[in-house]
Image (cartoon, helix red, strand yellow):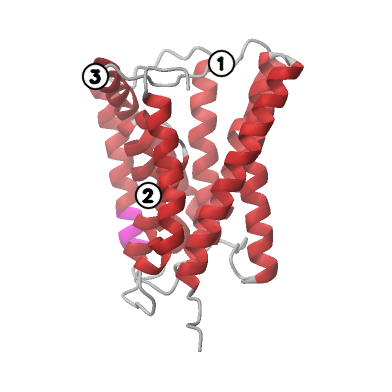
């Protein structure tokens, strides 16, 4: 008699398979774009759609074949408040982490990829708002706070959120963003669980991306390394934490543990994590690989 596949193990498989699909499409697509010699605008716009396509495919497959209750759209509008607090708090209070880690990596002789997105015209601003802010916010939240979180519903909320946040941070493939994205993923995870919907996390995700893009486009003079900016951000994050603790339905943490967290990691989850780690290491090497 074969052992029944747990939801956590199924989630690990979907995570690994989706990342491998994304990697294959990305490598093939990049070569095609290079051969076609498209403009920088088209290159970055199309490049941003590979992960969107992979995550949406996985989300649709999961909803049709496994669970139709994953992506709850109904939510209390009150949760727009913590969405804003999280987005603004992370940008101002933790944005300095990216430059700090980037500087550390460069000092050690490594390389930090810093793509120069063309943002010179209103058309480019609107295009990349859609391609780099809206679509990733929707597709990534569907996949990480939807598919993966649902697959880990049989373990404790803390273990689930931290596991999904780890996968989320490593997926971004940039050594300078690992800590920031991990912390941000934790906030997004608890926000989705508390609201019982991915919509607030989609809003927070979009606002964060949109703020970064807008600061670049409008040349807004804000220094994320300055102490006053960091202090404001940490204050907003404190407000987010207090909101999570004292408002809405309680408790936000479930101690229910039906399945084992290692089912997610062994053997499939570790494959997906390994793919991300390899990409991060290769991108940080001072070589053209």
> Mark 2 and mark 1: span between their CA atoms?
30 Å
* 250 up-or-down from 112: above or below: below
Predominant secondary structure in magenta? helix
Residue for point 50% across, 64% down: 11
Q: Please tell me which of labels 2 and 1 falls first in the chain.
A: 2
| Image quadrant in which you'd find residue 73 | bottom right
> Hey, which residue is sitting farthest right in the picture?
36
Helix, strand or loop at mark 1 = helix
Q: Which residue is mark 3?
A: 108
**Magenta-drawn segment:** 242-248
Q: Nearer the viewer, mark 2 or mark 1?
A: 2
Q: Which residue is mark 2?
A: 166
Q: Which percent across, then down, holds residue 49?
A: 66, 36
> Mark 1 and mark 3: span between their CA atoms?
31 Å
* 289 up-or-down from 141: above or below: above
Residue for point 25% across, 21% down: 104
Q: Which residue is mark 1?
A: 217
Residue count near mark 1 (Cα–Cα under 10 Å), binned few <14, some 14–19, many ≥20: some
Q: Which percent across, then down, holds residue 233?
A: 32, 33
Left or right: residue 232 compared with residue 154: left
């Amino acid at each position: 008699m074969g052992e029944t596949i747990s939801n956590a193990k199924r989630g690990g498989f979907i995570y690994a398979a989706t990342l491998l699909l994304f990697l294959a499409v990305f490598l093939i697509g990049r070569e095609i774009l290079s051969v076609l010699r498209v403009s920088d605008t088209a290159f970055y716009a199309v490049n941003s759609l590979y992960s969107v396509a992979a995550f949406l495919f996985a989300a649709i497959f999961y909803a049709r074949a496994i669970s139709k209750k994953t992506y709850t759209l109904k939510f209390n509008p009150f949760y727009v408040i913590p969405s804003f607090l999280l987005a603004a708090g992370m940008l101002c209070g933790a944005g300095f982490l990216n430059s700090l880690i980037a500087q550390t990596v460069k000092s050690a002789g490594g390389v930090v990829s810093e793509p120069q997105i063309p943002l010179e015209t209103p058309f480019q601003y609107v295009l990349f708002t859609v391609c780099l802010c809206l679509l990733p916010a929707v597709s990534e939240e569907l996949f990480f706070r939807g598919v993966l979180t649902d697959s880990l519903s049989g373990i404790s909320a803390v273990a689930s959120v931290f596991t999904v946040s780890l996968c989320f941070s490593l997926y971004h493939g940039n050594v300078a963003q690992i800590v920031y994205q991990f912390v941000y993923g934790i906030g997004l995870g608890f926000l989705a669980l508390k609201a019982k919907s991915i919509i607030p996390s989609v809003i927070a995700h979009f606002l964060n991306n949109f703020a970064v893009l807008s600061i670049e486009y409008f040349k807004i003079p804000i220094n994320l390394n300055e102490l006053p900016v960091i202090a404001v951000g940490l204050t907003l994050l404190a407000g987010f934490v207090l909101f999570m603790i004292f408002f809405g339905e309680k408790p936000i943490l479930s101690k229910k543990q039906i399945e084992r967290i290692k089912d997610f990691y062994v053997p499939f989850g570790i494959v997906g994590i390994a793919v991300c780690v390899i990409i991060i290491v290769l991108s940080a090497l001072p070589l053209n690989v």
